[in-house]
Amino acid sequence: MCLAIPARIVELTDDNAVVDAMGNRIEAKTSLVPEAKTGDIVLVHAGFAIAVVDEEEAKKTWKLIADLDEFNETDKRVSG
């Protein structure tokens, strides 16, 4: 399964972006979303921004990822 991560564009030159995904800086191409601009939140998959998304939806995804990360640190998880 593949996952696209919401990330905010913090730098943009032509179609080369640096995005921030929960504190992680990632390089991404914006050629698939030419309307994207600095400050927008985009879904990033395999090094490409594939869609511009609403901030509220991005916040829900960021919370889910943080919750999963927190759960992985507990003794409640089951392997296999």
Image (tube, rainbow, N blue to C red):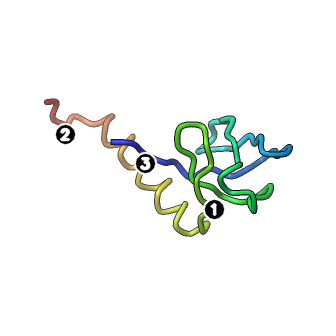
Q: Position of residue 19 (x, y in %)?
A: 69, 44
Which residue is found at the position 80% from the left and 55% from the top?
A: 38
Helix, strand or loop status at disc 1: strand
Helix, strand or loop status at disc 3: helix
Query: Which callout, 1 or 3, points at the residue further toward the start of the chain?
Result: 1
Spatial separation of the CA atoms under disc 1 and disc 2? 35 Å
Q: Which residue is mark 3?
A: 65
Quadrant of the rendered image containing residue 75: top left
Q: Amino acid at mark 2?
A: Lys
Q: Position of residue 11 (x, y in %)?
A: 81, 44
Query: Which callout, 1 or 2, points at the residue further toward the start of the chain?
Result: 1
**Nearest-to-viewer mark from 1 and 2:** 1
Check the image and name the residue furthest to the top: 80
Q: Dot 2: within a 10 Å radius of its alpha carbon, few (fewer than 14), some, or many (20 or more) residues? A: few
Q: Is residue 73 left or right of residue 51?
A: left
Spatial separation of the CA atoms under disc 3 and disc 2? 17 Å
**Nearest-to-viewer mark from 1 and 3:** 1
Q: Which label was assigned to residue 52?
A: 1
Q: Which label was assigned to residue 76?
A: 2
Q: Quadrant of the C terminus?
A: top left
Helix, strand or loop status at disc 2: loop
Q: Nearer the viewer, residue 59 or 48?
A: 48
Q: Position of residue 55 (x, y in %)?
A: 61, 66
Q: Is residue 74 left or right of residue 43?
A: left
Compared to 17, does 53 lie above or below?
A: below
Q: Amino acid at mark 3?
A: Ile
Compared to 80, does 38 lie above or below?
A: below
Which residue is found at the position 41% from the left and 54% from the top?
A: 64
Q: Is residue 43 left or right of residue 33?
A: left
Q: Is residue 46 left or right of residue 1?
A: right
Q: Quadrant of the N terminus?
A: top left
Q: Dot 1: within a 10 Å radius of its alpha carbon, few (fewer than 14), some, or many (20 or more) residues? A: many
